Image: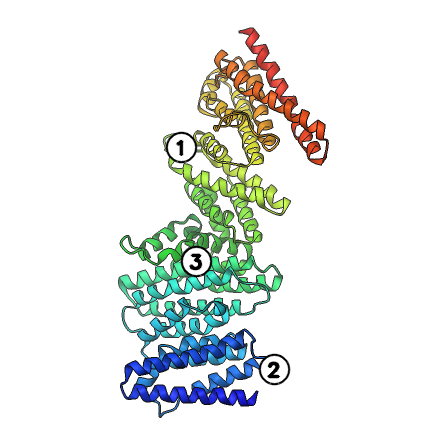
Amino acid sequence: MVAASDAMVATLHQTLASCSKSIEAGDYNNSEELIAELVNFLNSISDSLVSRERENEDPEKIAVEILTQIHQYIASPAVKQEVIDALAFELPKAVARFACVSTKCLEIAEDLVYWFIQRCSPRDMLSILCEAIGSPNELFTVPGYFIPLLGGLSKVLVLIQRRHYQQVKSAVPVILNVLKTMCSTSDDEDTDHEKLFHRAIGIAYSIRSICVNLEGEDKKKLRALLGLYVLQIMVDNSCALASFGIPSDILKCLSVVVELSDFLQHCELSYVGLITGCEVDTIYKLVVEDDSKDGMDCFSQAKLGAALAVIWGYKASEVGTAAKADLPVVIMELQGNWARRCEAIGMLKYIFSCANLPWELKQHGIRFLLRVLDGIVSHSHDDHVDYSVYMPTFYTSLQAVEMVIMYAPDSALRKDAFSAFKKVLADIPISLRFDVLRALLKNSDSSSMIGILLDCVKEEMRMGKIERNSSADAVLNSKVSQSTGFWNPSVLELVEVVLRPPKGGPPSLPQSSDAVLSALNLYRFILITESSGNSNSTGILSKGKLQKAYNEWFLPLRTLVTGTMAESQKDYDNLACDTICALNPVELVLYRCIELVEMKLKQL
């Protein structure tokens, strides 16, 4: 082992000496070949050490020896600056590979990168480090490789003398792409991920120190860039938490969030501005100019980061303290302002719909939403306002809450999510509420969720009937409420979507049994209510509508139900039993609907 190590050191010294001689002689072609030979030699060693190909040898000892010899050689007063400059283009990347061997090697590699930064042009080193970070070998796509390079970036940025904003803007996408890749591959046994995020935060500190010395538009834009950078790291750190799950790792993520939150006030980002998204839009427009969007995809999750910043503050008081935010005041402001509350609901959807976030954060998001909605005194709306502009926000937000209802592993969270769904629905103006539910229903492919949505429609109609009947002027109120709320002909379209799907034919059974049962119950409720109230707001009592329901909905469905149940009774295995149990209530309500329609047709 000693002989092999001595041979490697000898080859290293020989190759370094040859590189220096060629560079000093001005033989650029030969020097490039020799530097490439040096890099290949170093890479072959780091490859074998990281992949543990060298049996009966101590990888750390070999790596430390190689890194130490490199440091001693380039630090020698005899080595000229032109040699250092030439080697700096390749050695930082080669050295960073050795950092993956052990913690001690990482520290030495970091010192070597810092040494090059002190001796070489900051602008050159910025490009060199960004190139090294952006093009790792597959074997070295691990935190250990990136940590010394990111640490070097934090030091080189503050040494840049000109065009600070442009230089930082070019480096940030490279950094964020690395974090995104690393957080998707993290595991609870890897201790380097915490170091990686702290190096990324070190870069944020460097950007902040640059901001202090700038003035005017550049300062404003760099501060905005820092804000987006911090919000994106907030996302990556939170997504990394999904790979963990043990308390110690949650605390590590929390410590990163606390540090990140300390930057928010410097970036002029408040909790109200974050949770409503208005301040995120402002800084995004400053950074991502209309004519220059290249490379700015790295900020695509800034709004998710903004929502997470507030939810982390709701989860842990130390986060809110670091952000210098008063969360109760923020909640009160949302409770008292419908437009801002709507914007906040729209921002929370990014948390609920993100597949990479841990359920714990989604749970806190739901609880925060319930906290806001539970404190609303009244749901008053201005009849002169066009609320249709809010339709996309409510539609996409409720879709995101639906995902929590359907996929949350915890029953308590599913229950809270459904409660939040109903409270958000109640906060939507009545003129828009039906359209939102209709859009959700027509774009859902889950039978259970369609059943839930139809039940919500039925409940809205029931409450509308109660409010109408309790009015002092029952006749006038009937005309207004039934015609402008859920009591209108369009409600029968929702029944038809289920009982006669757009693609034609009756619904699939038993797969769609939940939706079919809710549709039948809704039809029965409307028919009985309209009949007993001597009204026909929905048009359900017209001969044409009754015949359509009877011939096009109920009779084909009856044929399908009876046929499916007959087949299931022949097999009588577990699947057949489940099918019969699912279709029994459908059959019961279906025959009641047929009976009611037949009675009405006879009366006409």
Which residue in the structure is indicated by mark 3? Answer: 231
Which residue in the structure is indicated by mark 2? Answer: 56
| Distance of label 1 from label 2 (alpha carbons) | 79 Å
- Relative vertical location of residue 277 with respect to residue 218 in this rendering, above or below: above
Q: Residues within 10 Å of mark 2 (few under 14, many from 20)?
A: few
Q: Residue at x 63, y 18 (%)?
A: 592
Amino acid on which disc 3 is placed: Leu
Amino acid on which disc 1 is placed: Asp
| Distance of label 1 from label 3 (alpha carbons) | 35 Å
Labels 1 and 3 touching (C-beta < 8 A): no
Q: Residues within 10 Å of mark 3 (few under 14, many from 20)?
A: many
Please say whether residue 547 is visible from this viewpoint: yes
Q: Position of residue 4 (x, y in %)?
A: 53, 87
| Distance of label 3 from label 2 (alpha carbons) | 47 Å
Q: Nearer the viewer, residue 61 or 194?
A: 61
- Relative vertical location of residue 449 with respect to residue 263 in this rendering, above or below: above
Q: Position of residue 130 (x, y in %)?
A: 37, 69
Question: Residue 456 falls in which quadrant of the image?
Answer: top right
Of callouts 3 and 2, which one flags the residue occurring earlier in the amino acid sequence? 2
Foreground mark, 1 or 2? 2
Foreground mark, 3 or 2? 2
Instruction: Name the side, left or right, on which 18 lies relative to 437.
Output: left
Q: Which mark is residue 483?
A: none
Of callouts 1 and 2, which one flags the residue occurring earlier in the amino acid sequence? 2
Q: Position of residue 322 (x, y in %)?
A: 48, 62
Which residue in the structure is indicated by mark 1? Answer: 382
- Relative vertical location of residue 145 with respect to residue 443 in this rendering, above or below: below
Q: Residue at x 57, y 39 (%)?
A: 419
